[in-house]
Image (cartoon, rainbow, N blue to C red):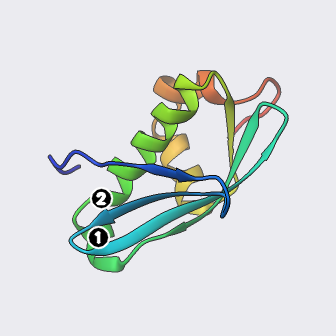
Amino acid sequence: MSDVALEVIDNEFLRQFEIVIDGQKSKIEYASQERKIFLTKLIMSEEQIEKGYDTDFIIAVFNIIEDRNSRLVPTCPIIAKFMRKNKRKYKNLLPVGINI
């Protein structure tokens, strides 16, 4: 994890959360249904991932979803892997009946 504060923008028109780091845009695409947000794809450069920005971005998006009192379903493998590693902390964000 880095020590950079990320400004995440929810681009509802394109259905994606966006950040800009070092001049590069990264995004997490999503689909929403009722009070669930399906996180479908993480698009980020290898360089940013190596610096740990993927973790920071995922945590920031999880916090946004939690603030909206919604639930999330991580269908993207990278985000699902993060959820499995941090299940104790974020299991309250999963819809009832969904296990990762």
Label 2 CA crowd tier, 10 Å (few <14, some 14–19, many 20+) = many
Number of numbered tags placed on the structure image: 2
Q: Which residue is mark 2?
A: 53
Along the line of sight, the residue nearer the viewer: 68 or 62: 68
Q: In terms of sequence position, does the residue under pointer 2 or pointer 1 come before the other?
A: 1
**Can you say whether 90 is above or below 17 in the image?**
above
x 30%, y 58%: residue: 53
Q: Is residue 33 left or right of residue 44?
A: right
Q: Please, what secondary structure does the residue beneath circle 1 have?
A: helix
Point out which mark residue 75 bears: none
Quadrant assignment for the C terminus: top right
Say what amino acid the circle numbered 2 marks.
Tyr
x 55%, y 42%: residue: 84
Q: Is residue 67 left or right of residue 14?
A: left
Q: Which residue is mark 1?
A: 48
Residue 4 position within the rendered picture, expressed as x and y whole percent measured from the top left? 18, 49
Label 1 CA crowd tier, 10 Å (few <14, some 14–19, many 20+) = some
